[in-house]
Structures are given as structure tokens and as C-alpha cells.
């Protein structure tokens, strides 16, 4: 039996899918295709690869500390999935993330095969994906590193490429290059053995056209299948500084229920690098210049994937995988179109109308609207960079902000006041806290509220209200069985979210 541990790399901020994707609510947690988030789809896909000879263990999710409750909330909707969340205090790219997961996977002396996938991709043909992944798992059982390579169907400038050589039968001898297993996902297809010439960076359009015309190039999907020990051994040889620093941070970890936290200071010192740069490119170069017997290192294999794969890296990709009407339009939300073609419109909070336009991206949220030519959607990150330069907040958090206890929506604000709509989940509570520069007025519009204010505890129901004076210790809880909703009016000289002094918190933020 081959034991598999799914590893979901759930990092990144998805800047090219702004304004829906923000640093505080990145694209992997959005529902952009189907009815589940990209994060949930990734978990479901990898957990579906079990077969007669393949057993799937608990999932490891590597994500940022700031996204832990978003991930946990979406996991709770998947009751059949058992998972552990490995929380990075800072982002250090995919090589340290995979190392973190590998160390967790071998902690009890086991050496499972890790099936590693980003959390922000979509696959249209689930059966073809499962067959390719099962083939990859079996190929990795001998200690090889297996990449899923995407068969390209257009000259794409947003992906890295893998260049392969001529095919030969799998059992052909004499080839000392990097080995690949190739064949479309149908099991009746012959498996072939190819040699990697090189990994190629994202090309310009002219170069991508040439790659497609020449053949022998595959998109690098960012999905890897390998034994945990294989990764740790290769990393020790090619990037020992990453292995040593990650091992130190992991050795000083703390464990809290489903959360595993490495030491923050030690983790922050880990060099930032990708799986490709830290190991794969160096490993490919090693096997093309030295005989494999010169150093006992893993070979790289590839299983091509033709399953409607897309990493949804920009809005034009979302348009491509969505159901289009007869004029090539894709719409979400309240929209009206006239004489409009090949356009993507996402309306979140109000009516969006389009007349006489073609090839546009229009994304409306409560606090920002994006309008872009579809061919330029890869460059939306320029807007995000400018927002950061101007020290504006629209690239960090949306107007509706999710918290472990529920969410709040900033409805209005002006000089010395702010109005929020707040929802608290059944049984949840905010932290015991106080504010030094603002007072708050609360009106219950749905459900039941339990309020601690100073030395008093009161219960409020619909249409009742209370007042929290400036500097008073207080807490809001929902003791009921339905969500609690209140309208909060803040007043004071400073209304920033950092004016919170927490004394007790159920979510480890005090």
C-alpha cells in the first residue's frame, strides 16, 4: 500500500484578481468556479486519489497565520476531511513551505509520499486529473520527484515552462538524463521516457509562440509528487541553508489543536526561495552533467496533464473557465448588458450596466471598481502596487472583513464616526477588550446578544440597544442558536482597528 499525505500550499495574495482578492482575503478562499472555494476544490481533488494500492492520510495545509481562521472555517464545511494547519508567521515562498510540511510528515518516523498542490487552481476534468495523479504517485514510489506538466494549448506568458527532449520507451537503456513519464491520462496510453533540457522562465509572447510551434514544452503546474525523505535529501544537498533554518524553526514549534506554529524569529530567518530554484533546476542540471551514479539523488519524472487545468492567475483566466453566453459574456450578480461581447462582469453589491463594449473586465465591490481590457488583466497588480505606495487600505482588506467569530461590514464613516454592520456566529464571542479613543453604540437587529460592560452583564434582543463608554472593558457574545446581527456606531477622535486592547480572547489574539 502506498501511503499519501496531501499538502496544500495556501499562500499568496492573488493581486491580479483585485478587487475581489485582497491580502486579508486572497483568491484561494474565493468561489470563482463552481460552488466551492478554490481552496476547498484543491482539498477535494487531492483527497479523491485513493485507489486499491493508494491510501490517503490526513491533509497538511501550509498557510499564513493571518489566514488560519479563514482556512479553518472553510474546512468545517468539509466534515469528511481531517487536516492539520501549519501556520507560517511570514511568507518564505514554496521551498520552506514544502520543507515545513515534510518535517511534519516524518515526525513519527513515517515517510509518506507528499502530493503537493497550490490552493488556487481549477481543474475541469476531475477524472483525468485523478488518473494522472495516481500515475504520479506510483511513479514517485521509487524515490523520484514527479511533476505534473500541463500540455499547452496556447502561447501563454504567465507560466513557467519545462523543455523536454525526444521520447523513447520507458525501458530503453543508456539515457542518463532526467527521466520523465509521459502519456495522456488514459491508462491505455503508452508511458514514455523523456529527458529534460531545462526549466524555462515566463516568456514574452514571441517566445511563447515559438515554444508552441516547436513542441516539447510543457507549462509548469506547480504540482509535485515525492516522498518526504526525497525532498529533505535533495534540499540538504542543493539548499542546506533552507533545510537547517526550517528545521530549527520547526524544532521550536508549538501545537494548539489543529494549529502547528514554528518559532516566529527562527522562521523569519529562513531564506525565501521557490521549489524550482532551491532544488529542481539544480537537480536537472546535475543529472545532465553527471552520471546518476556519481551522487545518489532523485530523478525527476513528469506526467503530462490534460484536464482543463487553469491557475486562475488573472481575470481573463476566470472568464475562460466560466460559462459564457451566446455573445461570449460572463456575468455574476446584478448586471444588465446591451450590445456587449466577450466581456466579464462581476457585480458584488449593486447593479452594473454595460453598453456597446467588447473584451472588458469589470469587477465591482462595495469599495472599489476595476475596469480593464481583458488582454491587459495580467497587469492588474500595477493598481495594487500603487495602492500600497499610496498607503491606502483597499489592497489589504475588503469592506466586509471576516473574523473567527463572524464578520463586520463598514457601512459608512466620516469625521469622528463610523457605522458597522456586525454578525456574530452562534456560540461565538468577541474578545474582552476596551478602546481608549472611541465609544460605541450597539443596536440588535437580529438574534440575541450577551453584553459585558464593566461589572454588568446584560442580555439584549431585537430592537434593543446599549452604550459602551470610552475606556470601558466590554465583550459581545452570541448565546443563541442563530447568527446575531447588530449595528455599531463608533464615535471618537480615532476610529482605527488598532485601538483595541484585548484582555481575553478565544482565538489567541490577546
Image (cartoon, helix red, strand yellow):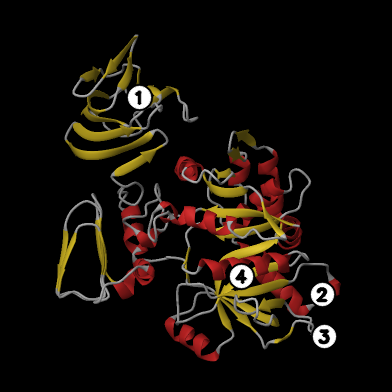
Q: Nearer the viewer, residue 340 or 235?
A: 340
Residue 88, given in percent of the width and then of the height, sits at 56, 45
Sequence-earlier tag: 1 or 3: 3
* Spatial separation of the CA atoms under disc 2 and disc 1: 65 Å
Q: CA distance from mark 2 to mark 4?
A: 26 Å
* Label 2 with label 1: CB-CB less than 8 Å: no
Name the secondary structure under disc 2.
Answer: helix
Provide the residue designation for mark 3. 174
Number of the label disc, if any, that sits on residue 365 = none
Name the residue that disc number 4 marks: 132
Question: Residue placed farthest to the bottom in the image?
Answer: 214
Q: Closer to the camera: disc 1 or disc 3?
A: 1
Measure the C-alpha gap from mark 4 to mark 3: 27 Å
Count of all numbered marks drawn on residues in the image: 4
Q: Is residue 411 above or below residue 303?
A: above
Residue 186: quarter of image: bottom right
2 vs 3, front mark: 3
Q: CA distance from mark 1 to mark 4?
A: 48 Å
Q: Secondary structure at mark 3?
A: loop
Q: Quadrant of the N terminus?
A: bottom right
The kind of secondary structure element at disc 4 is helix
Name the residue located 76 percent from the left edge and 79 percent from the top edge: 289
Q: Which residue is situated farthest in the front direction here?
A: 52
Residue at far right of view: 293
Amino acid at each position: 500500500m502506498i501511503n499519501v499525505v496531501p499538502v496544500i500550499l495556501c499562500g499568496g495574495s492573488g493581486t491580479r484578481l483585485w478587487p475581489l482578492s485582497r491580502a486579508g482575503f486572497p483568491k484561494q478562499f474565493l468561489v470563482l468556479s463552481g460552488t466551492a472555494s478554490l481552496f476547498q476544490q484543491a482539498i477535494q481533488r487531492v483527497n479523491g486519489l485513493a485507489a486499491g494500492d493508494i491510501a490517503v492520510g490526513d491533509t497538511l495545509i501550509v498557510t499564513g497565520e493571518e489566514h488560519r481562521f479563514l482556512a479553518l472555517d472553510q474546512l468545517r464545511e468539509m466534515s469528511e476531511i481531517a487536516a492539520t494547519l501549519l501556520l507560517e508567521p511570514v511568507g518564505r515562498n514554496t521551498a520552506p513551505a514544502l520543507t515545513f510540511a515534510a518535517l511534519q510528515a516524518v515526525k513519527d518516523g513515517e515517510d509518506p509520499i507528499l502530493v503537493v498542490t497550490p490552493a488556487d487552481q481549477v481543474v475541469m476534468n476531475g477524472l483525468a486529473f485523478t488518473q494522472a495523479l495516481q500515475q504520479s504517485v506510483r511513479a514517485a514510489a521509487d524515490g523520484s520527484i514527479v511533476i505534473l506538466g500541463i500540455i499547452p494549448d496556447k502561447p501563454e506568458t504567465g507560466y513557467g515552462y519545462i523543455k523536454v527532449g525526444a521520447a523513447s520507451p520507458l525501458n530503453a537503456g543508456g539515457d542518463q538524463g532526467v527521466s520523465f513519464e509521459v502519456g495522456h491520462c488514459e491508462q491505455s496510453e503508452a508511458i514514455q521516457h523523456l529527458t529534460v533540457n531545462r526549466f524555462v522562465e515566463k516568456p514574452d509572447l514571441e517566445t511563447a509562440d515559438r515554444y508552441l510551434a516547436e513542441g516539447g514544452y510543457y507549462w509548469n503546474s506547480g504540482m509535485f509528487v515525492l516522498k518526504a525523505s526525497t525532498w529533505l535529501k535533495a534540499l540538504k544537498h542543493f539548499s542546506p541553508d533552507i533545510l537547517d533554518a526550517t528545521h530549527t524553526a520547526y524544532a521550536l514549534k508549538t501545537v494548539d489543536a489543529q494549529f502547528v506554529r514554528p518559532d516566529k524569529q527562527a522562521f523569519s530567518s529562513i531564506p525565501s526561495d521557490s521549489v524550482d530554484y532551491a532544488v529542481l533546476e539544480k537537480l536537472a542540471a546535475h543529472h545532465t552533467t553527471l552520471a546518476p551514479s556519481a551522487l545518489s539523488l532523485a530523478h525527476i519524472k513528469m506526467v503530462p496533464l490534460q484536464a482543463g487545468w487553469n491557475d486562475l492567475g488573472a481575470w481573463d483566466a476566470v472568464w475562460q473557465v466560466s460559462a459564457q453566453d451566446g455573445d461570449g459574456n460572463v456575468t455574476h450578480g446584478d448586471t444588465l448588458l446591451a450590445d456587449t461581447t466577450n466581456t466579464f462582469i462581476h457585480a458584488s453589491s449593486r447593479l452594473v450596466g454595460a453598453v456597446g463594449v467588447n473584451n472588458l473586465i469589470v469587477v465591482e465591490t462595495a469599495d472599489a471598481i476595476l475596469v480593464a481590457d481583458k488582454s491587459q488583466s495580467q497587469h492588474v497588480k500595477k493598481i495594487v502596487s500603487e495602492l500600497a505606495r499610496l498607503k491606502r487600505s483597499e489592497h489589504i482588506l475588503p469592506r466586509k472583513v471576516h473574523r473567527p467569530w463572524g464578520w463586520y461590514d463598514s457601512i459608512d464613516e466620516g469625521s469622528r464616526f463610523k457605522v458597522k454592520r456586525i454578525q456574530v456566529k452562534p456560540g461565538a464571542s468577541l474578545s474582552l477588550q476596551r478602546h481608549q479613543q472611541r465609544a460605541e453604540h450597539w443596536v440588535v437587529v437580529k438574534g440575541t446578544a450577551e453584553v459585558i460592560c464593566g461589572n454588568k452583564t446584560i442580555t439584549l434582543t431585537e430592537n434593543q440597544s446599549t452604550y459602551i463608554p470610552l475606556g470601558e472593558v466590554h465583550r459581545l457574545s452570541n448565546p443563541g442558536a442563530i447568527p446575531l446581527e447588530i449595528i455599531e456606531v463608533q464615535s471618537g477622535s480615532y476610529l482605527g482597528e488598532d485601538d483595541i486592547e484585548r484582555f481575553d480572547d478565544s482565538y489567541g489574539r490577546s
